Image: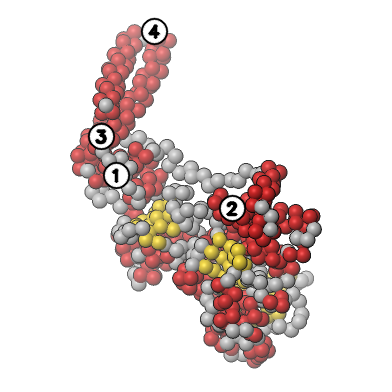
Amino acid sequence: MYPRHIIEQVLNATDIVKLVSTYCELKPTGSDRYVSLCPFHTEKTPSFTVSKSRQIYYCFGCGKGGDAISFLKDIQNISFMDALEILADEAGIHLPKTSYSSKERSPEQNDRRTLFQIVELSVEFYRNQLTKSLNGKIAQEYLRKRNISPEIQEEFRLGFAPADGYSLYRFLKSKGFSERLLLRSGLIRSGGEEGRYYDFFRNRILFPIRNIEGKVISFGGREITGEGPKYINLPETEIYQKNKVLYGLWEGKETIRSYENVILVEGYIDVLRCFQSGIRNVVATCGTALTAGQANLMKRFAPKVIIVYDGDEAGLSASIRATSVLLQAGLTVSAVTLPDGKDPDDFLQSNTVSEWNQRISSASTFFTFYLQQKQNLLSTPQGKITVLSELFRLISIMEENSIKEEFLKEIASALRISFWAVKSDYEQYLKNNYSVRSQTNNSHLESVSVDDIDFLHGLINDEQIKMRTKKLFQEIPLPETPLGMAVKYILENEDPDPRFMEECEGKKLLQKVLLSEPVNNDLKTLAIERLNRLHIEYINQQIGSIQQQIQEAEKRQQKERLMELLSNQKELITKRSQLSGVQIQNKR
């Protein structure tokens, strides 16, 4: 473990606002604070708050909070020490090698680091196969015919897997990696009677898949000879979960933030074509249907998604599934259909970027888009019921009633029937299909009241409250609660900084306090009342304990002991009455 002064040095050299901005779109709410949708849970309204001066964050929705190290640790699902080393490296701080060697990491942590190394070396190997070997000539010719420029190939680090099926395995073995980890990377397989090891990809152009930090974590592969499935993807590994990754997001996230929308396409080539055309707010799923995790990932960077899937029936079905997921995430959804069943790659090769932009800027809401695509069903009563049921299902996913009404009006106008008739049908649909949706449950710090939070505000900022609190807790012990832990830390530190507090519920509470404003105006009076309540709570515990001792003394007929206990109980009851009287006077 590194000493505290080194951890402090790394934290002081790290700008938490810049770090969090890599993963979320932070918006300023004053000179010091920024807010965003929480990256750790799904929410409709931003409750994730970051303080630039304090260098901490706290989510008022799910209770997650901490400093730069804990944020990186949780967002990347890595160890504290790995997060510390990453931030130290970015800040140019040299960490003593003797303090924390690879031997001191858990086997899982070492394996994870090694898997990243294996994947990164594989990127370089495949890139060299494409650009510098005779094996790559056929792949280069394919990319030339598809009009994928060398610059885009370089930016996205495209590669080529040779046809022999063993080249990567031999290369990685020469670097000293074990078969155990090569198999866990997904890039190497074993099988056959002799249990031989072979490459997962062969004779394919490879598309490296980056995570939000820009690290390559997986690959998609496209065949170029007409043999086998057109696309295959690596299976999930410890460093790659497909539901948390979008192809093109790392490369395009700044443009997405700037435009406040993201264009969702289906394929790797579609993304490359858009980027090559100067359209950088584009992402694709990695060979799977859109997931809730991917929708929430998009929502961190933009509130609106424009779907541009293939114009065939399969593309429409995929659009409906994607829209359902996106609406559940609270995103605004529009859709564009391209002419003649074209995909974005086809369209941009035969049309201008201006024509593309015109279609994007005039994108219909998904409801209008869907009605346009289903015109052939609207001529029959049963067809109309089918279309309405699908649209009602999508509207029921949405949270805001006002927006629901707008879309019901849009549907009524498109179908040329009255709004009230559509609304009545929708309400009937809800009755027939009602289901209870789960809500995010913030179980953190449930016992902490608004008064507790304001009391801590007073304790931090008012010396008289601090002295009075210190005096009370010289008489009675601090409660083993989040409030007690936070009070203890504040009393022991002149300028309490939760970044350097031990992990506990009290640390989360202190983070919450420092990123909120007090509700009560008279913090002194509130503090007196809260201290009295804490004192009364302690006295009640003492009275309860003495009552049990009294019952035991009565059973054993210990008269002297009984008299002593009764006297102590009486004193405590008197003291409690006095404290209660003070509270009543304060309230008056």
Q: CA distance from mark 2 to mark 1?
A: 41 Å
**Which residue is tagged 1?**
457
Residues tagged 1 and 4 counted as in contact (Cβ below 8 A): no
Mark whose residue sits in front, 1 or 4? 1
Disc 3 marks which amino acid? Thr
- Disc 3 element: helix
**357, above or below 512, in the image:** below
Label tally: 4
**In the drawing, does residue 564 fall left or right of residue 105?**
left
Labelled pair 2, 1 in contact (Cβ < 8 Å) = no
| Of pointers 1 and 4, the one earlier in the residue sequence | 1
Say which residue appears at 26% left-offset and 28% top-offset: 586
For the N terminus, the quadrant is bottom left
Q: CA distance from mark 2 to mark 3?
A: 46 Å
- Marks 2 and 3 in Cβ contact (< 8 Å): no
Q: Identify the residue at image location x=40%, y=61%.
A: 27
Would you say residue 124 is visible in this rendering?
no
Pointer 1 local density, CA inside 10 Å: few below 14, some 14–19, many at least 20: many
Q: Callout 2 environment at 10 Å: few (<14), some (14 to 19), or many (20+)?
A: some
Please tell me whether mark 2 or mark 3 is closer to you in this view.
Answer: 2
Residue beneath disc 4: 557
Q: Is residue 172 above or below residue 525?
A: below
Mark 4 element type: loop
Q: Position of residue 70 (x, y in %)?
A: 42, 57
Earlier-in-chain disc, 2 versus 1 = 2
Residue at the spot of label 2: 404
Q: Which residue is mark 3?
A: 525
| Circle 4 or circle 3, nearest the eye | 3
Mark 2 and mark 4 residues within 8 Å of each other at the beta carbon: no
441 up-or-down from 285: above or below: above
